[in-house]
C-alpha cells in the first residue's frame, strides 16, 4: 500500500508527530518559489519529473526514477504536511491556497530546465541538508514501491488524473446551478435565470469532450483526438443512429462512455502511427483514429457504458433506500483512510455519473461526514492538551488547520494531528461513521441528500446541497450529520483517544 509520512510535532514529546507550525522553533513555511525548488531537489531534480498536476491540497508528481527521490527530505520541508508515495506517483500534501502556487513554480522550473532560482541551488535557505545527504536505504524503498504499484492501484490513480483537473469547473458550475435554483424558487431576477442556467449547464453538457482530452493526455495519445472521439457521446446527431433497432440518446454512457472512447482512440492512434509511412502519418493517423474509435463508440461503447451508468444510479438508490444507515456508517468510517492514501479521487467518475443522471450525487454528503469526525477529534486533542505546555506546537497546528478542516479539507488535520497520534485517527473515523449513519438513516426514510457538484465538503458543501425533498430539508439533514460527526468524534477521542497513562516526555 502507499506509504505516508509525517514529522515530529515536538522534539521532546514521545509518540507525538506533526508538521512544522509557525513558531520560534519551527519557522513559517517558505514562499512558493523556495518550496518548489526544494521539492524538485528532493525528488531527483526537474529531469526526473515526467508529469505535474495538483488537486485541492496535493502536488502530484510522476517520477521517471522513484528511487532518486527522498521521502525523509521531502517530509522535513517546512510547509509539507505529508507525503504519499505509490511507485512513480508521488503526492505531496501542501494544503489549499498553497498547492496551486507551488505547482506553477514547479512547472515553470521543469519547463525552463532550471533546478534553482535566481542563481541559487535548490534547497538553499531551507535550513535543511541536501537530499543526497539524507538518502539511505534507497534500494529497499524501491523494492517496496514496486510491490505496492499493483495494476489496480495504478489504474485508479490514472483514472483519477483524468478527472481531478475538472473539479474546479464542477464546483463553479455547481454553485451557479444552486444559485439559479434559488432564484427560480423565489421568483427573483427572472431575466437573469436563463443566462445562469446556460452558464451552469454548458460545462456538464460538454464534459465528455473534456474527459476525452484529459484521458488521451494521461494515457499517451493526442489530446484533441481523444476529445474528438469522446465528443461523439454528447453530439445531438447521434439520436439518428440506430443500434439493434433502438435509437441512441445524446449523452448515453456519459463520462464513462467518453473515457472508454478516448482510451480506444489512444490505442488506435498508437497502432496506426506505428504502421503508416511518415509521409502519410499526418493524414491517415488522425482520420483512422477518429473513424475507428467513433464507430466503435456509436455501435458498442455508448450502449455498454449507458448500461453501466444506469446500474450505478440504480445501485446507489437501492443501497440508500434499503441499508442507508449501514452504508452511511461504512462510507463515512472508511473515507479518511481513502483520503490518506489518495485513493478518494477514484470515486470522481461515480460522482460525475450520478450528477449526470440525477442532478446530484448522494454519495458525497455521506463521505463528507468523515471530515466532521476529523474536526471533532482534533478539537478533543486540543482540549485534552490545553494544560500541557510541551505540546504547544501541536495546539498551534490544530488552530491553523481547523478552518480548512471545517471547510472540508482534511489533509492538514490527518497528517498533522490524528494520524501521527494514532488513536485519534481511529476515533475520527468513528465520528465520520456516526455522521454518515445519520444521513443514511434519513435516506432510508425517503429523504435523499445530494450535492450538485464535487470537490468541497464540510461547510463548503452547503451551497451545493439539494435533494428529493428540496434544498431546505437537505440542508437540515446534512447539518445534523455534521453535528453528529463533530460530537461523536470529539467524545470518542476525548474518552478513548489517549493512553490511560500519558507518556513521559523524553529528556531534552
Image (cartoon, rainbow, N blue to C red):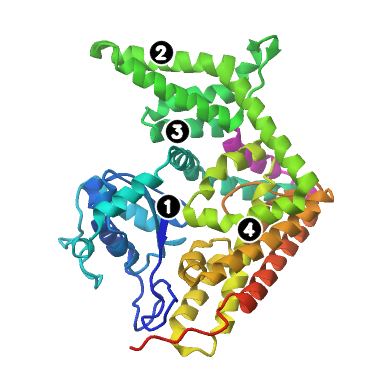
Q: Which residues are magenta?
A: 185-206
Q: Disc number at residue 2?
A: 1
Label 2: which secondary element: helix
Q: Disc number at residue 316?
A: none
Do labels 4 and 2 touch, CB within 8 Å?
no
Q: Residues within 10 Å of mark 4 (few under 14, many from 20)?
A: many
Q: Is residue 79 left or right of residue 472?
A: left
Q: Is residue 478 magenta?
A: no
Q: Is residue 187 left or right of residue 162?
A: right
Percent across and percent down for residue 121 are 17, 62
| Disc 3: which residue | 215
- Decide: is 279 above or below 148: above
* Label located before the other in sequence (4 or 1): 1
| Disc 4: which residue | 333
- Decide: is 142 above or below 302: below
| Disc 2: which residue | 288
Query: What's the CA distance linking mark 4 and mark 1?
Result: 19 Å
Amino acid at each position: 500500500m502507499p506509504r505516508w509520512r509525517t514529522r515530529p510535532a515536538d522534539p521532546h514529546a514521545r509518540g507525538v508527530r506533526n508538521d512544522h507550525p509557525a513558531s520560534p522553533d519551527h519557522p513559517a513555511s517558505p514562499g512558493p518559489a523556495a518550496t518548489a525548488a526544494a521539492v524538485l531537489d528532493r525528488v531527483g531534480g526537474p529531469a526526473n519529473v515526467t508529469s505535474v498536476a495538483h488537486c485541492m491540497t496535493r502536488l502530484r508528481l510522476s517520477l521517471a526514477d522513484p528511487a532518486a527521490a527522498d521521502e525523509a527530505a521531502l517530509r522535513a520541508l517546512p510547509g509539507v504536511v505529508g507525503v504519499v508515495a505509490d511507485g512513480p506517483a508521488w503526492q505531496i500534501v501542501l494544503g489549499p491556497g498553497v498547492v496551486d502556487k507551488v505547482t506553477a513554480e514547479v512547472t515553470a522550473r521543469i519547463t525552463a530546465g532550471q533546478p534553482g532560482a535566481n542563481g541559487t541551488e535548490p534547497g538553499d535557505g531551507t535550513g535543511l541538508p541536501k537530499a543526497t545527504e539524507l538518502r539511505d536505504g534507497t534500494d529497499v524503498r524501491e523494492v517496496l514501491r514496486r510491490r505496492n504499484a499493483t495494476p489496480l492501484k495504478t489504474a485508479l490513480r490514472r483514472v483519477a488524473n483524468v478527472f481531478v483537473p475538472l473539479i474546479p469547473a464542477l464546483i463553479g458550475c455547481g454553485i451557479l446551478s444552486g444559485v439559479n435554483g434559488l432564484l427560480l424558487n423565489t421568483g427573483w431576477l427572472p431575466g437573469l435565470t436563463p443566462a445562469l442556467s446556460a452558464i451552469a449547464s454548458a460545462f456538464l453538457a460538454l464534459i465528455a469532450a473534456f474527459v476525452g482530452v484529459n484521458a488521451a493526455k494521461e494515457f499517451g495519445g493526442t489530446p484533441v483526438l481523444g476529445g474528438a472521439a469522446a465528443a461523439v457521446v454528447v453530439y445531438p446527431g447521434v439520436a439518428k443512429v440506430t443500434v439493434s433497432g433502438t435509437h441512441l440518446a445524446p449523452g448515453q454512457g456519459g463520462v464513462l462512455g467518453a473515457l472508454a472512447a478516448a482510451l480506444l482512440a489512444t490505442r488506435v492512434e498508437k497502432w496506426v502511427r506505428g504502421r503508416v509511412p511518415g509521409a502519410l502519418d499526418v493524414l491517415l493517423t488522425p482520420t483512422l483514429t477518429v473513424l475507428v474509435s467513433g464507430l466503435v463508440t456509436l455501435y458498442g461503447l455508448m450502449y455498454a457504458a449507458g448500461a453501466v451508468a444506469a446500474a450505478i444510479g440504480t445501485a446507489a438508490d437501492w443501497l440508500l433506500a434499503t441499508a442507508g444507515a449501514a452504508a452511511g456508517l461504512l462510507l463515512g468510517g472508511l473515507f479518511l483512510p481513502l483520503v490518506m492514501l489518495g485513493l478518494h479521487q477514484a470515486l470522481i467518475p461515480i460522482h460525475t455519473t450520478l450528477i449526470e443522471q440525477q442532478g446530484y450525487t448522494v454519495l458525497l454528503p455521506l463521505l463528507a461526514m468523515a471530515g466532521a469526525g476529523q474536526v471533532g477529534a482534533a478539537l478533543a486533542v486540543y482540549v485534552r492538551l490545553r494544560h500541557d505546555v510541551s505540546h504547544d506546537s501541536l495546539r498551534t497546528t490544530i488552530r491553523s488547520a481547523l478552518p480548512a478542516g471545517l471547510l472540508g479539507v482534511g489533509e492538514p488535520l490527518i497528517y498533522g494531528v490524528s494520524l501521527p497520534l494514532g488513536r485519534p485517527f481511529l476515533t475520527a473515523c468513528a465520528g465520520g461513521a456516526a455522521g454518515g449513519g445519520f444521513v443514511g438513516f434519513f435516506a432510508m426514510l425517503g429523504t435523499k441528500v445530494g450535492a450538485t457538484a464535487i470537490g468541497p465538503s464540510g461547510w463548503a458543501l452547503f451551497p451545493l446541497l439539494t435533494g428529493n425533498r428540496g434544498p431546505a430539508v437537505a440542508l437540515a439533514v446534512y447539518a445534523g450529520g455534521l453535528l453528529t460527526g463533530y460530537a461523536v468524534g470529539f467524545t470518542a477521542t476525548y474518552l478513548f483517544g489517549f493512553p490511560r497513562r500519558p507518556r513521559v516526555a523524553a529528556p531534552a
